[in-house]
Image: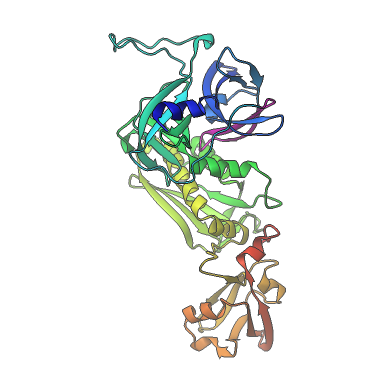
Amino acid sequence: MNLLLAAASIAQSVVLIAASTQGGSKTGSGFAISSTASTTRILTAAHVIDGSTSPLVFVGGPRGDHYPATVLQTDKLRDIALLEIQYRGIPTVTLDDALPVSGTAVQALGYPTFASVPANNPQATPQPLPLSQMQLVTVSAKLDGVAEEGESILLNASLTHGDSGGPIVDATSGKLEGMVLGLAAGYGVAQWMTGDGLGISAAAINAFLAQSGPSATPGAPAFNVVFSPNKNTEISNSWTELASSAGFATAAAHKDGGQCTNAAGAATANAVIEERTEEGVFAFIVRDCSGAVYYQDYIDMDPGALPNACRLLGRAFLGYIDTHRPEWQTLLRYGIAVDPKQNPYLALMSVGRNPFGQLIVTHIFRDGPADRAGLHQGDAIVKIDGQPTRALADLYISRLMNQPSVTLVVDRDEKESTVKLTLQRFAQLTADGPIPR
């Protein structure tokens, strides 16, 4: 497929979007991502429709038919929105499964708001176009690579107002590589690239769309946001947006004695997110409820750029959890991050050593296998399958516990009893939704 054919194959999927807000009106681009017998779903940039309750979608350009759109979902951190119109017949795009490769020839399609500057007068000021004169424009470019753990793609192309929300397609295959967000400088990331354009990747679009379908769990687990001493509202909003983008709710809580609790001591959340600002470095850390670090990232920053640092680190974190989804789910559901590849069988309990070297149950996850077997926090595990635990290395204990069932000798209040523990695989544990902590 040559360059012209690549653009032509997807051009009919691209729409013009007009949004009226209290501050006036604005336009942008979008493209059809899916359809039913009576509706079509459109992706665009969240900032295109921000502040508008009923944006208009023009099919076939400004002179084509237009339809009021329902905003189904937005993700302000990723800057992406999903709309739906009561119309069918728009061709839909095909998302690419692989991460884009630096140097790939691509094309960005959109409806620019400004007229192009004449070639004989490059210093002329671009003039805004009335809606009726806007046309679909294709810009050829090359990818400079990916950023933010695959969430963003970088374009060696100068984009303009109105291109936001338009598709970025592989010039050879015609598959969707991402969506235009705008100029990189406007997002504070110009230093990462040689070109000027910034877009959201197909991988991030897929992650966003996965949240718009039916929920596989009955509810959204909650996690904490633990703030550093500054009370910056923009930073607080950034973490709220991160919670929304990750698909989970926030909870007003604090870390107390290794557990995620509120001021009254009741458990309210399954993980802790911290921020730290020290000596020009902004640190973003996610811990489980035992205090162990699940994820951490750092960025050098200007003292006045804290909100932007939150956004950059948040987007990188989204890219990480998209590729480490099982561990993230267990962290949010049980308070500990578990890799099902490394732990085929799970008891859902935490163990540790007391000062006398005994193996002690430090935490039991409600309704998990250990809880159902009757184990309690504080129980001393004396033997596992007949082998005394005091003489066993912790690594060997982990191996013994990594099987379908084990027999434990437990000491509780100086009385020993035998417990048959049937462990479960990760898929079994998550089949019916989250297990409460």
Image coords of residue 360 (percent x, y): 57, 78
Q: Report if residue 85 lies within the magenta region.
A: yes
Q: Could you say where residue 296 lies in the image, as x and y percent from the top left?
A: 43, 54
Comparing 333 with 235, the one in front is 333
Q: Is residue 272 above or below residue 290?
A: above
Judged left or right of residue 92, residue 228 is left
- Which quarter of the picture shows residue 388? bottom right
The percent position of residue 171, horizontal first and vertical second, equals 41, 33
| Residue situated in front as seen by the camera: 95 or 50 | 95
Q: Give 154 or 246, whichever is nearer the viewer.
A: 154
In the image, residue 211 above or below residue 378: above
Residue 212 place in picture, x, y as percent: 63, 41
In the displayed structure, 415 sits above or below 48; it is: below
Residue at left 71%, top 73%?
Answer: 372
For residue 79: magenta?
yes
| Residue 366 seen in the figure | yes
Q: Which residues are magenta?
A: 70-88
Report the magenta stretch's main SS.
strand
Please name the colour scheme applied to the rendered image.
rainbow
- Give the quarter of the figure containing the C terminus: bottom right
